[in-house]
Amino acid sequence: MSTNIRPDHVSAFEALTSGDHDNFALFSCFLDCEPVSAIAAIVAVTPPNVPGGEYLITPLFVSVTEAMSLTDHDGDAA
């Protein structure tokens, strides 16, 4: 069977479900100009006590939008 699940998807899912990490957030953003939310990993680039510090925000999973069409590998609607 074919799959679109890549190793980095599995790693992200395992990190989210393991409870071993606390640097995840629900992040308000846009996908193709549509408002969505994403589950994102947040990592401080500068030390957290530095005012105006920078953060690396890596989206892991994005919410479904009305324009998206979810189907299985045969093209059947989910």
Image (cartoon, rainbow, N blue to C red):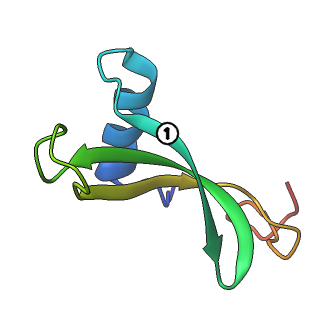
Could you say where residue 50 lies in the image, as x and y percent from the top left? 15, 46
- Which residue type does callout 1 highlight? Ala
**Left or right of residue 73: residue 14:** left
> Residue at the bottom extreme?
33
Most foreground residue, 55 or 74: 55
Judged left or right of residue 73, residue 52 is left
Residue 33 vertical position relative to residue 42 in the rendered view, above or below = below
**Which one is nearer the viewer's eye here, 3 or 18?**
18
Judge left or right: residue 7 versus residue 74. Answer: left
Write down the residue under mark 1: 25
Which image quadrant for residue 53?
Answer: bottom left
Q: Residue at x 15, y 53 (%)?
A: 45
Asked if 48 appears above or below 33 in the picture, the reply is above
Q: Dot 1, crowdedness within 10 Å: few (<14), some or many (≥20)?
A: some
Q: Residue at x 37, y 29 (%)?
A: 14
- Secondary structure under tag 1 reads strand
Q: Position of residue 58 (x, y in %)?
A: 36, 57
x and y, in percent, of residue 15 in the image: 34, 29
Task: Work out whether 18 lies above or below 3.
Answer: above
Residue extending furthest top?
19
